[in-house]
């Protein structure tokens, strides 16, 4: 349940954006506007371009696949580690 993930992150961050396209959010991470990003149950088309942008910018983008959908975390290594400690990246 992603609402539980958001509730777990709110006390730890200055802001959370939860509406819009995953590709756009990943590009904002790649550009340094956002520190990190996570999302559950994405399609390949939702993350492909943003995934490449993150890697080209020197960040990391990790995902797991479950039944054709992808759970993803992106950002700098330390940010991704913090996100993974705070949110449940399983469906």
Image (cartoon, helix red, strand yellow):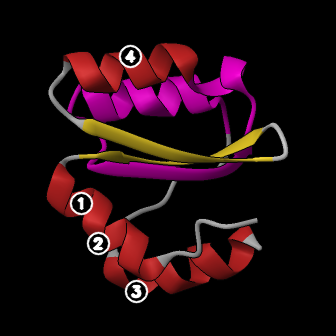
Q: CA distance from mark 3 to mark 4?
A: 30 Å
Q: Residue at x 36, y 30 (%)?
A: 28
Q: CA distance from mark 1 to mark 2?
A: 5 Å
Label 1 sits on residue: 79
Name the spot of residue 72 as percent of width and height, x first. 53, 47
Q: Residue at x 27, y 66 (%)?
A: 81
Q: CA distance from mark 4 to mark 2?
A: 22 Å
Please say whether residue 62 is visible from this viewpoint.
Answer: yes
Residue 15, quarter of picture: bottom left
Label 4 sits on residue: 52
Which badge, 1 or 3, comes first in the chain's sequence? 3
Quadrant position of the C terminus in the picture: bottom right
Q: Is residue 50 left or right of residue 54?
A: right
Q: Is residue 72 magenta?
A: no
Label 3 sits on residue: 11
Q: CA distance from mark 4 to mark 1?
A: 18 Å
- Stretch in magenta: 20-47
| Disc 1 + disc 2, Cβ < 8 Å | yes
| Disc 4 + disc 1, Cβ < 8 Å | no
Which badge, 3 or 4, comes first in the chain's sequence? 3
Q: Is residue 90 left or right of residue 89?
A: right
Which badge, 4 or 1, comes first in the chain's sequence? 4
Please say whether residue 14 is visible from this viewpoint.
Answer: no
Q: In the figure, 24 relative to 41: above or below?
A: above
Label 2 sits on residue: 82
Name the spot of residue 64 as percent of width and height, x first. 58, 49
Is disc 4 surrounded by few (<14), some (14 to 19) or many (20+) residues within 10 Å? Answer: some
Q: How many discs appear?
A: 4
Q: Is residue 46 magenta?
A: yes
Residue 31, quarter of picture: top left
Q: Is residue 73 left or right of residue 29?
A: right
Task: Judge depth for marks 2 and 3 and give the one in front.
Answer: 2
């Amino acid at each position: 349940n992603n609402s539980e993930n958001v509730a777990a992150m709110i006390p730890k961050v200055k802001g959370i954006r939860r509406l819009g396209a995953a590709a756009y959010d990943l590009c904002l991470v790649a550009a340094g506007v956002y520190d990190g990003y996570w999302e559950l149950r994405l399609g390949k088309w939702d993350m492909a371009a943003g995934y490449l942008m993150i890697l080209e910018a020197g960040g990391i983008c990790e995902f797991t696949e479950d039944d054709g959908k992808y759970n993803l975390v992106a950002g700098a290594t330390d940010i991704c580690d913090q996100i993974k400690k705070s949110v449940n990246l399983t469906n």
